[in-house]
Amino acid sequence: MDLNELRDDCARKQKKGLHFILASVFIWCAVLVVQLTELPMLTKNLLTFCCTAPLLPLAFLISKIIGVDFQNKDNPLTNLGILFSVNQVLYLLIAMWIYPVIPEKMLMVITIIFGAHLMPYSWLYRSKAYMVFSVIIPISALIVGLSFAPYVLVIAMLVFEIVFSILLVLENMGMRIMIAILIALLTCFLIPVGVLLIYSPGNTKPFLNADGTPLVSSVSEKTRATIGDVEQGMFIRGKNIQNPVLLFLHGGPGMPEYFLAEKYLAGLEEHFTVCYWEQRGGAISYNPDMSPENITAQQLISDTIEVTNYLRERFGQKKIYLLAHSWGSFIGIQTVKQSPELYHAYIGVAQVSQMAESERRGYLYMLEQYAMVGNKSMVKKLNNYAVLESDDALRLFLKSALRDKTMHELGVGTMQDMKSVITGVFFPVMKCKAYSSEEKVDIWRAKMFLRNKTVLIDQLFAADLTAEVRQVEIPVYFISGRSDYTVNYDLSKAYLRQIAAPLKGFYTFEQSAHSPLFEEPEKFVQIMTEDVQNGATVLADTEPRGDK
């Protein structure tokens, strides 16, 4: 037989390696189970390596079931196929190096290696399916691996492997069917990409008159300014630029909230010119070349003051209002302590005070709730984190998927009615037309970067604002959801009691968890217009009105 005949024989007798691709589906299922556990990342990575061990015996078993000549000893090209696989094993040394150095990216590297090793088989088996997936898998692994949690990458790989298996079956049946399926798959790929592009023009909606023309006195823009020698992005919106200016500090670190404000809080822009600044290193202020060493709480305080002065100069106002939510309140209250002369008042929503203690209280609450309903499985999972015994365990719990899952299941997370961050946060971000598709990817890259590469989380948990900020020289307003265990309601309320300020008011939102400004927006806007703008506390809970 000549070379082409040997290739055809190899493809026919080994069914184009279908047994190995089917075996890999089972392997990726096992990896998914590992990635969905609450084990430490290094342990997950070790178990992921272990999951790959049964590939060969599993492929051999499947070959017997589907009638593949596993060894095909009469064909010398069989040995070439073995060399293609051995070559992949050598490249896994790169993944072994990544394992302790950048553990959260090890799975991405393995996936890229796996996808790339398929290309030689496209020649051996005369297979377009191998060629297509040898390109699609590495590129997709890079994009998904840089933007999402490892388990999302595993789910994507499972989809690829199942489709790949179907295509190989069809290739073995005949090329015409294969071409039709490839066209269908390409269409299925282009549809979601097209939808994403439609939802990602990257522009803000203007304020319009009744006749559809732009409102002359309004502002609605996405802009950038050099803040602290770094270009940073912000959205500025308001119906009348003569209205008071309000600077909004989002939560996180690195979780912008413009997409939520656009959906829930449009009424605020009737009364204020609102600047939704996306902090250094976050969202549209993200730059992959940024050094994490330059992103600290003190730097963000300095940036806040600089953004404030930019807004004061641009809109010709001597003072502005400062509104901060969650993580933003950690930065915000320190800012107004440092430079009170720049602000009319400070509004802290889900005001941070002692974050480590807040996290412990939230953990205990969730343990009690699951124990009360007899959910032993969830109690066991929570007990895997020694949150009450170790600050390291507390930080691990903060970054875990379990924390988000339990808080949202119990209605004490982002919002009372938000049961999943996928439907409540991820999808709304992807549908927000103010961001381009590239910026939407950067939102998730930035969030991971700020949480995992900078000292911001460590600084947040080490701080005790009840000792560090005891006096503020401007009116102070705290707003908290009764069901907030992300930033503990009781701790925020106790903190305001001890702050010395010329005027202060605490506002309880009974139907809210961590985001009362988005959960009860009408009430929030009422407080902002009737109390905050008038320097009053008429709508506040029964608390001291002010003290020096």
Image (spheres, rainbow, N blue to C red):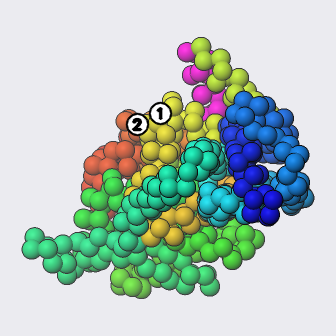
State the SS at label 1: loop
Amino acid, disc 2: Asp
Give percent across and percent down for residue 251.
Answer: 53, 56
* CB contact under 8 Å: marks 1 and 2: yes
Q: Name the residue under label 1.
A: 411
Q: Please identify the quarter of the rendering in which residue 347 is found.
A: bottom left
At a point 60% along the width and 28% down the height, the residue shown is 366
Q: Please identify the quarter of the rendering in which residue 383 is found.
A: top right
Q: Mark 2 points at which residue?
A: 417
Instruction: Residue 370: say if magenta.
Output: yes
Q: Quadrant of the N terminus?
A: bottom right
Q: Can residue 465 be seen in this view?
A: no
The span picked out in magenta is 360-373
Give percent across and percent down for residue 212.
Answer: 14, 74
Q: Is residue 371 visible?
A: yes
Q: Is residue 360 above or below residue 289?
A: above
Task: Give the class, few, some or many, for how many residues have Cα within 10 Å of label 1's Cα (few <14, many ≥20).
Answer: many
Circle number at residue 7: none
Q: Which of 27 and 264 is in front in this view?
A: 27
Amino acid, disc 1: Gly
At a point 47% along the width and 33% down the height, the residue shown is 411
